[in-house]
Amino acid sequence: WEYRAQNRSKHGHIWTGIFIILVGVAALIKVSVEGLPAWLFSWQMFLIALGLFIGFKHKFRGSAWFVLILLGTAFMLRDMYPEVSFRPYIWPSVLVLIGILIVLRPRSNRCEFADEKKNDLDDDDTYSTSSDRSRNRKTSGIDYLTSTSIFSGSKKNIISKDFKGGDVVNIFGGSELDLSQADIKETASIEITNIFGGSKLIIPAHWHIKSEAVMIFGGLDDRRKVEPNPEQEHKTLIIKGTILFGGVDVRSY
């Protein structure tokens, strides 16, 4: 996992820069070249491009990229063919796509660590979910977390004593990650992609925060009252990724 994290951190800012360059080039072409189709520079195409960007950046893991491409394509077809009613096809298509996602979805994140560290997981560690909003919180003892929120929110409690990091995606949504009961070995990194979304991190007050994320009309706000204690072991949580019209809120209780 450490190798994968280093590889993502090395190329994450490159993908972000390329995406911004392409958006700028598209805007220049729009104002410079006449006769191009309107759909090529529509907000629907932006959703499709954003989905492809997230897919390439995260090696097409998760479902965020797929949902964005699906939404962009659906709205584009509706505008391109107004005489056709797509409503009767919506639910059958949704069921088919959900089935495909279930089939292609990895069985569990635990398998990624089965060969590397079998003793990291305790039989007592639980991973519970609920559709009830008031109980929409997951508790996990695994060392690596993944969270994807699209037009929704999620809450997770991490209790791992050897937390290594994670991958968080919020698109028009938010996530709350409670690491107050977790521990790290010197350093850990979380890659966060917030697009019109936000993340709230609850971490111990003595952890150091190092931001390496690309901020575009967004920011990171550390609201903790950090009291240096030389007797405590130096621990650093590195925040990486892309924050576009969003934010990261860091707190401790």
Image: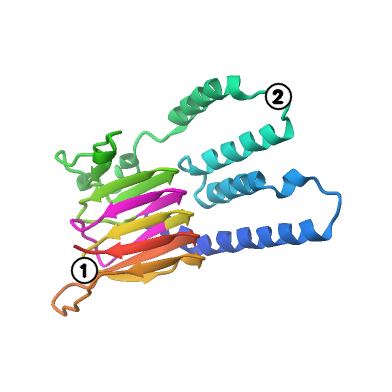
The numbered mark at residue 242 is: none
Which residue carries the number 2 mark?
Answer: 84
Point out residue 238 in the picture as x, y percentages from the top left corner. 36, 66
Give the residue type that dot 2 points to. Answer: Val
- Badge 1: residue crowd in 10 Å (few <14, some 14–19, many ≥20): some
Please tell me how many numbered marks the rendered image carries. 2
Residue 3: tell me if it is visible.
no
- In the image: residue 35, left or right of residue 199: right
Q: For the point 25% across and 40% down, which residue is it?
A: 134
Point out residue 38 in the picture as x, y percentages from the top left corner. 76, 46
Quarter of the image containing the C terminus?
bottom left
Give the secondary structure at mark 2: loop
- In the image: residue 37, left or right of residue 239: right
Q: Residue furthest front?
A: 83
Point out residue 203 in the picture as x, y percentages from the top left corner. 24, 62
Give the secondary structure at mark 1: loop
Which residue carries the number 1 mark?
Answer: 205
Q: Nearer the viewer, residue 57 or 213?
A: 213
